[in-house]
Amino acid sequence: MNTTQSSSQRDFVVLAVRTPQKDTEGQGSPSVSRGAGNSLEYLDVEWVTEHARQVSRMLPGGMSVIGVFLVTPPELSKEAQNTLRRLIFAVDKHISKGRLWSLTEEDVTEKVTLHICSKTRKVVCRTYDVRDPKSSAKPADWKYQSGVCTSWPLLTCSVGLNLVFPVLEMHVLPQDMEKCMKEGLQTWAKQIEDGLCLINGDAMPGEVELLGGQKKNAKAVQQTFRAQILIPMAEPQSERRLTATVKVCSGSLTLKGMVQCRAYLHSNKPRAKHATEVIKRDVINTVSSRVEMFLEDLLMEGEDKGSVGVQQVLPRRVFAPVPGMSLCVCDYMFPDECVSDVSDRLKEMLDWETPEDSIDTSQEAVPEAPTIDLKNTVVQKNLKAKSTLDARPKTPSEDPTEAHKSHKTYYAGVAMAAAIALLATGTSLIYLSD
Amino acid sequence: MVVGNIILRLRGSLEFKCQLDSTDVPHVQKVISRTFEALGSQVKAESLVLSLSSSPVFLWPNKGGHATAGEISPNRPCKDLQQLIQTDDQESSRKKSAKKDKKNPTAGIINLTLMTEVTEPGVLSAPTLLRGSKKHHLLQTTLPMDCVVSVLSSESISVVCGTLVGALCSQLGDMEKVALRHMKGTALLIPQPFHFLLPAPVGLVTVVYPAGVPDSQLETRRKELHSLFELPDDRPYLRRANALHFPDEPYKDGYLRNPHVHLNLPALENGKPYLVQGVYSYHHYMQDRVDDNGWGCAYRSLQTICSWFQQQGYVERAVPSHKEIQQALVEVGDKQGSFLGSRQWIGSIEVAAVLDQLLGVTSKIMFVSQGSELASKGRELANHFLSEGTPIMIGGGVLAHTILGVAWSETTGQIRYLILDPHYTGAEDLQVITDKGWCGWKGPEFWDQNAYYNLCLPQRPKTI
């Protein structure tokens, strides 16, 4: 699929990543799959949408998955259009699930579908408005440009969290943990969305151009802006209330710590309004993503009674540069993972090699071992070592690689229908034949 | 201009949230106190931000008063903040506000709101999730912080910021005391701040009262405060209704308050004005969708008087309608049942009866057999305004009016009456009302020289 920045007339595709191939039980070899289907019927839509969701988690603010592409032999070209349409709606729906911020009227909801014929190299580009399930395809021009994002400004901030979510009496942990957290996070997300954003210490009116005063064609160095988010300390209560509300709770969930946030902006006259929007969305996304990941992981592991009363570390954010560009993508590292795991994931999801030392794990520090836990925990300051903060007691016989794999909700394997292609950013089109 | 004082008002909500593991009193009190202590730390944190209302300026009071706008540095005088406030309709309100500045010491307030910067974290490590499994009661509310400080306009911003944070902390302390004093089990009454402008030298004070507890039950507290501020013990100063009304907050009910303050005093040789004390609302014909044109003047004068007792804090009931007034008269036996719904006039005696029945207020009745005699009542009226300061209802001939004051010269005997006329049928237009004399100073010729008049002089109950 394509990941990019959107504007109402132009989308910039910065990455096109192919969906990894799926493992079909027992029948691994590609040769089998080639023969099996000259039909897109067997294309696993769920697989593609899940890949899209994983990739969108890896994108900092200002970037999103905006489309899908398909490379097929010419005889499947027509069917490809229908498939693309199905895919684009499904992908958008899956990605928007669990999103804690709302689209505004100015958000572009046109998503891109791209079909490339493996024989003629012909490119057909269309867009669909995913807000309208009945929308029809609109033609679009597909152009190559080089050096587009070398000077995209970057916004950064680090947001402190100190949220306490009550677990009402009627709820039971851990089944209802997701519900409790979602409700609490929804309120928090609204506060962030409604909050005020200062850029480089200034409260600018929305229409102000951030790069005002710069020469248009100057080969600008990537500018970094510091964002600050201000919110009211609390929402005022209804005037009619006379007493504090009392809720009987069976427990509580405390989310504490700092998240590092980033967002990129179009270099084409970015306005303060757009900037505040993208950074706020990144703040909300990064928190909700890692909570989601944590909960997914917990679901897979099953409930462990030892984790109550202990601070469990949520996955922390690390950044990796995109080859050939001054952009970064991000990933989340669980406490017992190391940089090589991140590197593996980047290869799998985004299909590029990342040298381990280029992965920046320093933005979010590893929390100290909690003092609440009655068991002995060892403080691990070494970022690379397998951390013992994971509350699950590890037996020596446990295979470490198994433990790593269990955190991944991804699947590896061989796909079936579509052929393989790789679209490099910028100048040329490279094909790998099947 | 003389370097005077500036008033800064800081408002906002603080989240009050605490977990009660048990409901026994000592534990509850301990937890409540600890929660207030934590709020105190929050207020002193570097992440606290004050937003200057109607401006793009933000201040970080716990970072030495650092501000967003470049022109404002922490050692500038705080009056510079006023210039940064953008007001909407400066044109139309200039005329009114000029007059208000003279009469109202709280004009030109700087309003600030409480905010927090989420991008100013104290903790630096990646997020953790802690699951607590203890059963507990979760107490949650927001505290309506409202601090007012009066500082020299030449005081630096950084010092003023410190003063404001100090005011917040001290208000939290007051709120804690009130919360603990009135707590019952797990029911925490929300502490609410009220501001009062007390007579010099005390000035502006803020008192915290628990929500839902009526003034009648807070007398002990008021007694303590009256003694603390050396206030007379026979009239209310600290009831909720006495709270200071800030000029930038319009009254929501639509009635005009004290239109007489916009008038020039009559110039009498050796004359002194004796005016109504406190605040009243102007009630007149055609208000409240009641067409009482031609018969309701005494009712309206009575409503004005009732509004005075309500706004001085003597009563909590709303100003009575024509129906309620008539009902009261039937109840005391002054009128027959057929009176209800009629358009019959009432006089001073009925006014006094209703004040007694509905408000528990007693009145003195003054009788003059001829209108011309009113010219000689200067001393009596002056004394009334000095000691009671309540509006007077005067009825005679076929008309009823409200007397809000007299200007009287002891030496020459010259007299003028400040009259509020209930016969006005127009809209709440201050300009028209003052220009056309619906509220205005009249001479003794205003009265029908041959008619007899009854005056109802309401007496202040001796209470705080």
Image (cartoon, coloured by chain):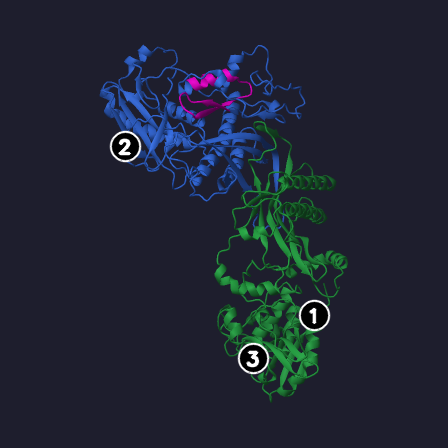
> How far is disc 3 from disc 2 in space, using C-alphas?
82 Å
The vertical placement of B337 against B218, above or below, is below
Q: Nearer the viewer, mark 3 or mark 2?
A: 2
Q: Which residue carries the number 2 mark?
A: A140
Label 1–label 2 contact, CB within 8 A: no
Please, which chain is the residue tagged with disc 1 on?
B
Q: Are marks 3 and 2 on the same chain?
A: no
Residue farthest bottom in this picture: B450
- The quarter of the displayed image where residue B20 is located: top right
Q: Residue at x 49, y 20 (%)?
A: A359
The vertical placement of A338 against B382, above or below, is above
Q: Nearer the viewer, mark 1 or mark 3?
A: 1
Tell me the amino acid under the disc marked 1. Arg
Tell me the amino acid under the disc marked 2. Ala
Q: In the figure, what tint was chain B given?
A: green
- At label 3, counting other C-alpha atoms closer than 10 Å, the crowd grade (few under 14, some 14-19, many 20 or more) is some
Q: Identify the chain drawn in blue.
A: A
> How far is disc 1 from disc 2 in space, using C-alphas?
82 Å
Q: Write the start and end of the magenta stretch as one range.
A: A318-347
Residue B315 visible in this rendered orientation of the protein: yes
Q: Nearer the viewer, mark 1 or mark 2?
A: 2
Q: Residue at x 54, y 13 (%)?
A: A400
- The quarter of the displayed image where residue A53 is located: top left
Q: Which residue carries the number 3 mark?
A: B345
Please, which chain is the residue tagged with disc 3 on?
B
Secondary structure at numbered mark 2: loop
Q: Is residue B138 left or right of residue B232?
A: left
Q: Residue at x 48, y 72 (%)?
A: B426
The image position of residue B16, as x and y in percent, is: 63, 42
Q: Is residue B210 left or right of residue A47?
A: right
Please, which chain is the residue tagged with disc 2 on?
A
Tell me the amino acid under the disc marked 3. Trp
